[in-house]
Image (cartoon, rainbow, N blue to C red):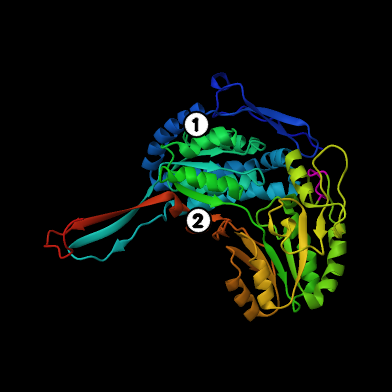
Amino acid sequence: MTPAPPPSTPHTLDPDTLGPDTLQVLDPATERVLATVPAATAADVHTAVVRATRAQARWAALAPGDRARLLRRFAAAVDARTEELALLEVHEAGHVIGNARWEAGNVRDLLDYAAGGVERLTGRQIPVAGGLDITLLEPLGVVGVIAPWNFPLPIAAWGTAPALAAGNAVILKPAETTPLTALRLAEIALEAGLPEHLLQVLPGRGPVAGNALVEHPGVAKIVFTGSAAVGRQVLAKGAALLKRVTLELGGKSPNIVFADADLEAAAAATPMSFLDNSGQDCCARTRILVQRPVYDRFLDLLTPAIESVVVGDPADPGTDMGPLISRAQLDRVRSYVGPNLPGIRGKAPEGPGFWFPPTVLTGVDPTARVAVEEVFGPVAVVLPFDDEADAIRLANATEYGLSGSIWTRDVGRALRVSQAVRAGNLSVNSHSSVRYWTPFGGFKQSGLGRELGPDALTAFTETKNVFISDSRTSTEGPAQ
């Protein structure tokens, strides 16, 4: 395996002023220690907020064209370091190299897309009597982004890029297990010319640095991606300060295969619909719903597709699936899969590393834990259904509503089922969920708000209404 690039000392943290707590970063494929990183304290968060507040005022005062140019320079700098960032992602998160390169490129694309919105972030002129009424979209101030470990690079950019483009400063707290790409991203931002302290990265533990960021009155908004349980805590703590919160939480997404579908195409696409990133994906289609007349045929087609998935060294371009992120995650996944459950199982390496084989369970009760809870690993269940109504009932029979797929040749059915399934991101004859130019978010316990897409920047602004009297007598009534 290619050695990981040596991690840089975090420029946003001064090791001489930090407490003794450190974060140990492991390579999940080998269990070797990649780096130790100082963990931020509540005092570090406060210092970062003070610095960010000053930097944001200067940033917002720049001409929109200047902010856009700096963000494009940031994107170009990321593009020039794609391979470096990808290798860090391989070694700290266990992502296969092809995915990691795509993820680094996605950060570049997000920054470019957000830069294009800076000079198009416009308000409105509203017809009123007695004068002129306009709305202004103004930055919130300091935004806290709490990023997860499953996609540390791209999801950090989901919040960071539009927040910066809208004129805000960002404090990014990466997950404890995957801080290295975030730290490097902040260094690249400085190298590209972004003002000091505009983008700060504070690695730290959730109950310490994360809580301090959520509870700080100087942070106007929190963008959190993670579990539903922690998301509810973030929402409750933010509510005490009437803080804006965007939450992207869990999922238990259906992959609905109707009898009229192209079964060969559906079966061929199914493995990576839930095995991408070793199943550590909120959009993973881990509930495979197959219409009963084609159930057996579909399993016959799926079996060789699952068994052919290559699990191994994530730095090898021939690998399809890497390890899980940690020993704790491996233990969690194992707790859902008993040794005697029937199904289809692939192969995984033995020895060092957090490995689990691709697994598809059959004959599972639709109400069993593995069928309704988010496993967050390379495990799916196959459930038969009778008709369209039964498919919709099963698809909606979880507390989540993030994503899903519908396989059918009937356009009318595709439209009906898309409207009936309670999920924020659906694909027909596809497993695509996330594009930076379309909105992303969930229903039910999968989150609040939307990220990405053409409205991403407005989510980081306040709307201010300004009325300019033309000095004629107003007919609008008394001031309120």
User: Between 450 and 139, which is closer to the camera in this rendering?
Assistant: 450
Tag 1: amino acid = Val
Q: Which residue is mark 2?
A: 449
Residue assigned mark 1: 45
Q: Residues within 10 Å of mark 2 (few under 14, many from 20)?
A: some
Residues under numbered marks 1 and 2 in contact, where contact means CB atoms less than 8 Å apart: no
Q: Residue at x 88, y 51 (%)?
A: 347
- Residue at (77, 34) in percent of width and height: 3
Q: Secondary structure at mark 1?
A: helix
Extent of the magenta region: 313-319
Hey, what amino acid is under mark 2? Answer: Gly
- Overall secondary structure of the magenta stretch? loop
> In this picture, is 183 found above or below 165?
above
Q: Position of residue 186 (x, y in %)?
A: 56, 36
The percent coordinates of residue 397 (x first, y second) are 65, 65
Label 1: how many residues lie within 10 Å, few (<14), some (14-19) or many (20+)?
many
